[in-house]
Image (tube, grey):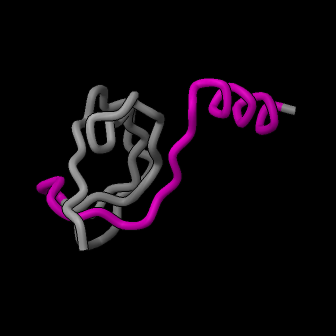
Amino acid sequence: MAEIKFEIIEHIGVISESSKGWTKELNLISWNGKEPKYDLRDWDPNKEKMGKGITLTKDELDTLKKVLNS
């Protein structure tokens, strides 16, 4: 399996935290050197392991916000 490289460009916020210390976070992340996207997923306390998540462009995030506010 190919190594996935990531850089957290901006930490936006923590949504929740599990009893084991993992946090569900919204971050702006560059995956494999590509343009950063908004990312919502679980992270271990050291940011070495991650759970499955979802990435969104700025337009998709704006649309999601509109949907949630309606």
Q: Which residue is at a point 21% across and 49% down the rendered structure image? A: 5
Q: Nearer the viewer, residue 27 or 18?
A: 27
Image coordinates for residue 67, horizontal then vertical, percent: 81, 36
Image coordinates for residue 65, horizontal then vertical, percent: 70, 31
**In which quadrant is the N terminus drawn?**
bottom left
Q: Which residue is at a point 43% across and 40% down the rendered structure image? A: 26
Q: Is residue 33 left or right of residue 57?
A: left
Q: Is residue 51 magenta?
A: yes
Q: Which residues are magenta?
A: 45-69
Task: Reply above or below: 49 against 70.
Answer: below
Rendered image quadrant of residue 31 = top left
- Outermost residue, right side: 70
Q: Is residue 70 left or right of residue 3?
A: right
Task: Reply above or below: 64 against 18.
Answer: above
Q: Nearer the viewer, residue 60 or 47?
A: 60
**In which quadrant is the C terminus drawn?**
top right
Q: Nearer the viewer, residue 9 or 1?
A: 1
Q: Which residue is at a point 39% across and 46% down the rendered structure image? A: 25
Image coordinates for residue 38, horizontal then vertical, percent: 47, 35
Rendered image quadrant of residue 22 = bottom left
Q: Is residue 46 magenta?
A: yes
Rendered image quadrant of residue 39 = top left
Q: Which residue is at a point 27% across and 27% down the rendered structure image? A: 9
Number of numbered discs overlaid on the protein picture: 0
